[in-house]
Image (cartoon, rainbow, N blue to C red):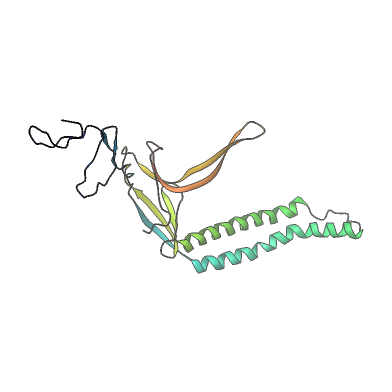
């Protein structure tokens, strides 16, 4: 019997090919991670999906601040901030105008620290309030949920500012307690001239982080509804 014979000359049974490896499908398909090499068949299972962490945002207090109220509030704060800004800049403009025109300045200085400091403090407070209103307006407009501290969050779901308490289940990997935080995912460490290391945060995401093992954390969609 030669190597190329398909049937045995003695018993009539079909013979195996002497060389080469074949997988017969009988007209069907083979689906999945099946690979054949060197006479061996390796089955690679699909990677397991990451275990999901469960949480429940519970509304604790719903404010009357809607998108329209926040828009008008920001407009009013912006106008109010012009007054302290003018009282800080006006003395400088008068001093610069006197120098350009050649008119000597008055005996008393055009402004003093005691005169400018209250207006500067008022301007800083109004600027911070304006930034906070813009941030809250964005939360309401996009219906976002933003982590605060100690498991609290501010949400714009429902078209108004709502304070929520995020109740999370235990960590599905180790059973530790999960907390709702603003997780730093991208950062950059720099060293200043004095040799001090400073961390610059480039990106934060809402996440459920395990208190027992901070490496166990799960990103939360900030636009997910209640």
- 88 to 175, vertically: above or below: below
Inspect this view and state whether residue 89 appears.
Answer: yes
In the displayed orientation, state which residue is furthest to the left: 11
Residue nearest the observer in this picture, 38 or 140? 38
Where is residue 137? Give x, y as percent. Answer: 51, 62
Residue nearest the observer in this picture, 63 or 197? 197
Q: Residue at x 74, y 57 (%)?
A: 88
Residue nearest the observer in this picture, 43 or 96? 43
Q: Residue at x 35, y 41 (%)?
A: 177
Question: Left or right: 116 with respect to 192?
Answer: right
Q: Residue at x 44, y 65 (%)?
A: 159
Identify the image quadrant of residue 124.
bottom right
Question: Left or right: 176 with respect to 100?
Answer: left
Question: Left or right: 139 with respect to 41?
Answer: right
Where is residue 171? Give x, y as percent. Answer: 33, 41
Quadrant position of the C terminus in the picture = bottom left
Identify the image quadrant of residue 6.
top left
Q: Residue at x 54, y 45 (%)?
A: 202
Residue nearest the observer in this picture, 132 or 54? 54
Number of disc labels: 0
Inspect this view and state whether residue 150 appears.
Answer: no
Quadrant position of the N terminus in the picture = top left
Where is residue 215? Give x, y as percent. Answer: 40, 37
Where is residue 158? Give x, y as percent. Answer: 41, 64
């Amino acid at each position: 019997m030669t190597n190329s014979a398909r049937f045995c000359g003695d018993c009539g049974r079909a013979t195996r090919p002497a060389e080469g490896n074949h997988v017969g499908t009988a007209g069907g398909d083979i689906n999945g991670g099946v690979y054949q090499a060197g006479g061996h068949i390796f089955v690679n299972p699909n990677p397991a999906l990451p275990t999901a962490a469960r949480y429940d945002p519970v509304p604790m207090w719903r404010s009357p601040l809607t998108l329209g109220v926040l828009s008008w509030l920001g407009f009013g704060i912006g106008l109010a901030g012009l007054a302290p800004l003018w009282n800080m800049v006006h003395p400088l403009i008068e001093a610069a105008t006197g120098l350009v025109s050649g008119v000597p300045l008055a005996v008393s200085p055009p402004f003093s620290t005691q005169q400018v400091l209250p207006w500067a403090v008022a301007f800083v407070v109004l600027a911070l309030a304006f930034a906070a209103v813009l941030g809250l307006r964005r939360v309401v407009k996009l219906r976002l949920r933003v982590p605060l501290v100690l498991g609290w969050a501010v949400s714009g779901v429902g078209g108004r500012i709502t304070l929520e308490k995020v109740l999370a289940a235990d960590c599905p990997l180790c059973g530790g307690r999960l907390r709702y935080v603003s997780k730093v995912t991208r950062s950059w460490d720099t060293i200043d001239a004095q040799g001090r290391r400073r961390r610059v945060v480039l990106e934060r995401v809402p996440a459920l982080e395990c208190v027992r093992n901070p490496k166990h954390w799960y990103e939360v969609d900030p636009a997910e509804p209640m």
